[in-house]
Image: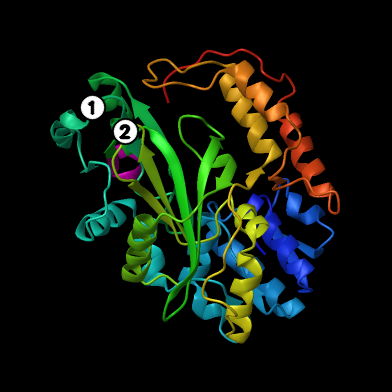
Amino acid sequence: MLDGHSSAALAFTRSLGRAEHWVAVGSNRGISSPADRSRYCRLTVKYPVPSEDASGFVETILEFARKNGIELIIPITDWTVMPLSKNRDQFQGVARLALAPHAALELAADKFRTVSLARELQIPVPETRLIHSIRDLDSATALGSPVVIKDRFSARWEGNRAILGSVSYAYSREDLKRKVEDRLKQTGDVLVQQFVPGEGIGYSCLATDTDVCLPFMWLRVREVDPRGSGSSAQRSIAMMPEVKEQSNDLVRRMGLQGICMVEFKRPHIGGPPVLMEVNARPWGSIPLPISCGIDYPRLWVDWLLIGELLSREIEYKTSITCRRLVGELTHLEHTFHGTPSGWPIAYPDFFRTLLKISVPWYPGMRYADLWFSDPFPAFAGLAGWFRGHTRFFKPKPRSPA
């Protein structure tokens, strides 16, 4: 299990450990890894930061797999997926990689190609422009305000290193020009996209070589950054047939295999959900479907190792809310600093948010990180968060992202 700092890695470690698999956890050197502290982690390995030394990362994992007889390697984040996928031939006869076909991973990683494919499938998407130079901004004047400036890739690989992607907002023509110029110097192209205010909706599944199975759907209750990011709390909801059909079409056309998720926004002003992106890898809120009855890690590993999938669809629990403590604290920190300058829609109020997240439990609540039967990962995560916030909630100037 790689990316031990991530919430998905912890969920995998616990799920597979409870299923009596032997689990080792890998993570970046010099970073806190809560999954290392799990009672289900049997061995750990530290590797070079993949975005800074991809070949060193691959060599470390390959050596560890050979030395310890590792049967399956599961990368969690974009920083480990692509280096392993590009070097998958080196792992033949050593260990299996939990990866979709390389061409499918490249397609899902490219946000512009994903939007283009969605348009072809008649799936609603935000108006999006691919910008190669400042002159191309003339076509972006009709996108409204704010405008989203988004890198085409979460990680753009150049040789042995990666340029990490970013998302920001522009509130004026001058602001847009300045931020686009900055990204073009680093990446060569950038996406300028219509801002879609609305609720985040997630759809997940397990794609085999013949079918799309185990559908699950949820609503984002709170996002770590209220302007847009991964969620700190989410709630399971009943399946929306239209979103399921569109997501399955997209997954099939991309040629994805394994567990994946498709993210939508449900606009506040009404209308159909709008596609945001596709993750061809595990995602941060995966503890929620596990709590609701779809244990993706165990089911995926059973399919990979023994070719067995007991059920193609499982009736899951709805109205289950799953929270991650560190994410909730970061969300609260954002609300403490107030509405960012220029933000056009309602922003969470600090005291109301404090009241909501201060409720430790209610029927249907689960925790992604805090387990009484496995408490140390949560303690490690909280300790790391507070170490980085020694002057917690210190007021600081806010400027548009």
Q: Is residue 166 visible?
A: no
Residue 46 lies in quadrant:
bottom right
Q: Amino acid at mark 1?
A: Gly
Display coloring? rainbow
| Residue indicated by mark 2 | 195
Q: Position of residue 390 (x, y in %)?
A: 75, 23
Please state the extent of the stretch shown in magenta in the rendering: 184-191
Quarter the C terminus occupies: top left
Q: Is residue 336 magenta?
A: no
Q: Residues within 10 Å of mark 1 (few under 14, many from 20)?
A: few
- The local secondary structure at tag 1 comes to loop
Q: For the residues labelled 2 and 1, say whether their Cβ atoms are less than 8 Å apart.
A: yes
**Vertical comparison of 336 with 239: above or below:** above
Residue 382 visible in the snapshot? yes
Q: As rendered, which of 195 and 43 lies closer to the eye?
A: 195
State the residue position of label 1: 144
